Image: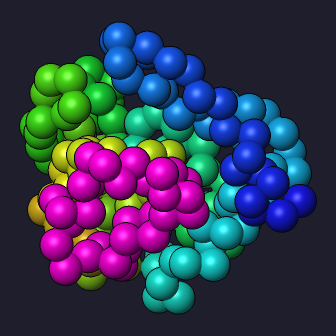
Amino acid sequence: MKLDRALGLLREVPDFPRPGVVFRDLTPVLANPDALRAVVDALQDKIHPDTQVVAAIESRGFLLGAALGYGWRYGVVPLRKPGKLPAVAHRVSYDLEYGTATLELPADSITPGQQVVVVDDVLATGGTAAAACQLVERAGGVVTGVSVALELTALAGRDRLPGRSVHSLLAV
């Protein structure tokens, strides 16, 4: 399946999570095996060749990150919400479109000098991706890029990632 057809499965849900917001739901893309393969292959095409580890952001980033890790033999590190990890190396709090949040990095998961790509489903305001990059760098990792399936350009998330290589498969 071609990428444009795969991303055409994206569902728009009006007034979620609050009135006036249009939620872009990747679930139909992830549920279709050919669409999932097209998206993961397209993400891989943009990842720096020296990358060793995928830092996958909770929760839909886990799905894309695990597929990338398996398919191209990267390690996968889950960046989790608070209270989900038994051993935490670092934590970063940040602003979201609708409030604040925190991400945590598991202890002993990224070693100094490791080349790490940050992966998520959507780049919106950039707060989550910026926090993920901070976590990787606090552990001594080197961020090779940020890769997402969907970018909401009106929210200017790239502005929170200056100097970083950012790749999105679809910008709306």
Relative height, residue 84 to residue 45 (above, below):
above
**Residue occupying the point 63% across, 61% down:** 68
Q: Is residue 131 visible in the rendered structure shown here?
A: yes
On the picture, is 83 further left or further right than 14?
left
On the picture, is 83 further left or further right than 67?
left
Q: Nearest the camera: 9 or 154? A: 154
Q: Residue furthest front?
A: 20
Q: Residue furthest bottom?
A: 49
Q: Position of residue 40 (x, y in %)?
A: 68, 60
Q: Does the magenta segment cover residue 165?
A: yes
On the picture, is 26 further left or further right than 108?
right
Quadrant of residue 91 in the image?
top left
Find the magenta span and give its range: 143-172
Q: Nearest the camera: 120 or 88? A: 120
Q: Which color scheme did the rendering employ for the protein?
A: rainbow
Task: Name the image quarter holding the N terminus.
Answer: bottom right
Q: Does the magenta segment cover residue 11?
A: no
**Residue occupying the point 84% across, 39% down:** 32
**Residue occupying the point 83% across, 64% down:** 2
Quadrant of residue 124 in the image?
top left
**Residue occupying the point 26% across, 76% down:** 164
Q: Position of residue 133 (x, y in %)?
A: 23, 61
Q: Position of residue 11 (x, y in %)?
A: 65, 30
On the picture, is 54 further left or further right than 165?
right
Relative height, residue 119 to residue 29 (above, below):
below
Q: Is residue 114 visible in the rendered structure shown here?
A: no
Q: Position of residue 97 (x, y in %)?
A: 22, 31
Image mark count = 0
Q: Nearest the camera: 118 or 25? A: 25
Relative height, residue 149 to residue 79 (above, below):
below
